[in-house]
Image: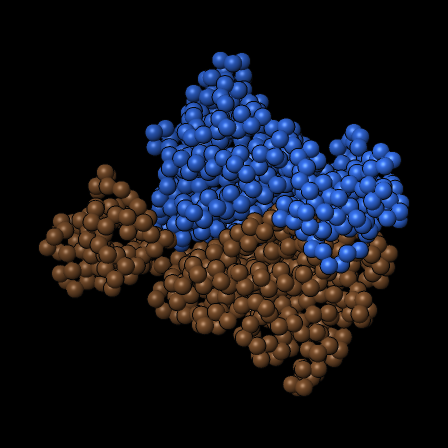
Chain colours: A blue, B brown
Amino acid sequence: MDQSSPAPRISELHDHAGQPVVVRGWVTHVRSSGKVAFAVIRDGTGVCQAVFVKSVVPPEVWERFGQLTTEASVLVTGIPKPEPRAPGGFDLQVSDLVIHGESPTDYPIQPKEHGVDHLLDNRHLWLRSPRQRAIFVIRNEIEQAVHDFYYQRGFLRVDTPLLTAAIGERAGLFETEYFEEGKAYLAQTGQLYGEAAAAAFGKIYTFGPTFRAEKSKTRRHLTEFWMIEPEVAWNDSADNMRLQEDFVAYLVQRVLEKCRPQLAELERDVAKLEKVTVPFVRIDYTDAVATLQSKGSDVKWGDDLGAEDEALLVEDYEKPVFVMNYPKEAKAFYMKENPADPRTVLCDDLLAPEGYGEIIGGSQREDDYEKMIARIKEEGLPLDAYGWYIELRKYGTFVHSGFGLGLERTVAWICGLPHIREAIAFPRMMHRLRP
Amino acid sequence: MDQSSPAPRISELHDHAGQPVVVRGWVTHVRSSGKVAFAVIRDGTGVCQAVFVKSVVPPEVWERFGQLTTEASVLVTGIPKPEPRAPGGFDLQVSDLVIHGESPTDYPIQPKEHGVDHLLDNRHLWLRSPRQRAIFVIRNEIEQAVHDFYYQRGFLRVDTPLLTAAIGERAGLFETEYFEEGKAYLAQTGQLYGEAAAAAFGKIYTFGPTFRAEKSKTRRHLTEFWMIEPEVAWNDSADNMRLQEDFVAYLVQRVLEKCRPQLAELERDVAKLEKVTVPFVRIDYTDAVATLQSKGSDVKWGDDLGAEDEALLVEDYEKPVFVMNYPKEAKAFYMKENPADPRTVLCDDLLAPEGYGEIIGGSQREDDYEKMIARIKEEGLPLDAYGWYIELRKYGTFVHSGFGLGLERTVAWICGLPHIREAIAFPRMMHRLRP
């Protein structure tokens, strides 16, 4: 082993063309003609093809090549040469090979079809596949884009608590004992805290995990998922929708700009993503119901829209669609009554195209002290658990709006994934707590 | 009210000097000479001084000024003029005032000394103070700096699960019922998952909340706190410490570059922060114990270092100090045995200066399959809960290292806060679950 050579990541090989290096990684494929042998090596930053020429390498190196198995970890010394036809764009002309960690031939993921339960049971290894890496490169880009978007616009990120005594929505709470304080609940949203922070800092956003102890087994539900929840003082519902469309269009644009190879790996139809530009269409809930009924849905005014209705409504559009101003009874207590139609509230859901459905729920918040108290009582919620929240309407109440974007739903849509479970590294679902 | 004027944030007033605008915000102070009156308005992005000239404004506006109370929300129409002596650098020459939301005179936070319990009970309002805003501007800058640092270096952010069946460390777990899967535990670390992700993606980091159900009542402990946990394939312990010092020096540098006004608000001695440059001193644990004993500590070889010992050790240094290679029994089972002294492990704690103590714990991870199994058994941990984790050593084991930086401890140190509770928006401590 040549200890003196640099050991770059595969993504850095272009800086080392023609110079001996040590590549450290894992074997994904091997093949041999008898005189020349190839091993594709991945190191998480990229792949390169190690080329072993029998007449050039020492006999013991040739012999070691024969011992390589899938996911064995190796240190390969060689000279990188650009080779457009090679996986990853580089051949490595090998002079030495060390097998660092063997990989028994019972490696759980083989180049054949596996059932999804087997893959999820082996999620810690499944992540090593090219498809999974492509998803997580895109997820990483989306996350960085979220932060860049709000940082550039002067928002403060605020980390709201996960352990909470207050109750955001009513059902589906995970609970735990909290010392002598009694029960604590895992947050379903950071919004209520975000509202307090918006009064303090003007423009804020949260970025964190949220929890739903719901027995949902759909392709759009996780029990633990990440949400981005901006909240802006002095924004009304119209401002709120403008922020949402700017935000979503920015995320899609960033992925198109930075992640073309990963979208190709996923065979994503990028033409569909390229259509996601502002403005998005806005449909009043009442009009949406009429449209759905004309398309044969049995939805009635007053109902929330289910996944099927959402898909039916969006099928006529090539980009996300806002449905706004839902009936009060279909939505949460904190949404502001619509002065133009007090049966409804100033809110919106943003529905992604291609059948992906709701990725955002947003609203202007009720800012009237008395109305807020009345709504909490109407819903049968414990008034004193909301004492601090109500005080935001007592001391200098303010027009404000915000929304929550579901990160995994957004990743699934942008990546074109059939199920949300692939959009997070270690998904948590009703029957899935491991690994 | 002039509906046609733009309504910029106070931070944007410099783009509107000399033009009528509407400022929307909250009243922090008022004073009046009888002919000229001043109200300082904050909107979360900054403050400006609204100037009411009795002979200029309509009588009803002058009268409304007299009704202003602390934290009333207002819409003030006026013309901004740069005024270096004014709070926030702008005077607003007022023509109109609307009181949007009154604020009763029982506002809980008055310009006097309050006990910390009162302030924490009113955390949703306390956040509005200039000191708290300064802290959260700095926290926001640190968080963005974290993401920028790793994004620029090609790390993938990986969000590891909070609900987990596996057990990272042994004591102090919050638990919850998880459907038919039995108990789930709130994660104390994302590290084990981070190791799996490092084998898949090479260089990763996590950024998320972690939990400790510990009855600690010190100024350095929260039950819920945020950690950044990088994990890097092929990094050994020395590489790991280089990454840590580059990272911490970068965070401090970013705050010095971007947050001078906030550091001034906090009366932080920036000269102390300016000394935080690489490299940091590295002290072997064994030498640290000898030094501590010579300073009068009764620490014995084999003990972990407590907060007092840490402070005693660091008092001779002006920047963070690494203490490395602790005895095996003082540290977690997953740390790699030190080949040069098998009584110890390849690890480090990074201790912040000025008495702030440990902000990072890091280590090279045990990568030997048999040794890992032996260590898990030695610690009495359930082997099958770690099955997937052990497999990382079975299929292509790899040298790897990582660390966890405590976000609130880092914010507290950089801001110079006496207690970690101010470093997070809604702190969770043993007796503190609200608001």
Q: Looking at the rendering, in which quadrant would you find the N terminus of chain A?
A: bottom right
Q: Residue at x 13, y 56 (%)?
A: B54
- Expressed as whole percent of the image width and height from the top left, the position of residue B143 reads 52, 54
Number of labelled discs? 0
Q: Is residue B394 above or below residue A408?
A: below
Q: Residue at x 73, y 43 (%)?
A: A92
Of A55 and B64, nearer the camera is A55
- Indicate the quadrant where residue A270 lies: top right
The residue furthest left is B55
- Expressed as whole percent of the image width and height from the top left, the position of residue A291 reads 47, 17
Of B289 and B244, nearer the camera is B244
Q: Is residue B240 left or right of residue B262?
A: right
Q: Is residue A412 above or below residue B404?
A: above
Q: Is residue A270 left or right of residue A348?
A: right
Q: Is residue A229 left or right of residue B221?
A: left
Of B126 and A387, nearer the camera is B126
Residue A78 visible, this angle: yes
Of B428 and A226, nearer the camera is A226
Q: Residue at x 64, y 34 (%)?
A: A420
- Expressed as whole percent of the image width and height from the top left, the position of residue B344 reads 78, 69
- Expressed as whole percent of the image width and height from the top left, the position of residue A372 reads 41, 43
Q: Residue at x 36, y 69 (%)?
A: B112
Residue A186 visible, this angle: no
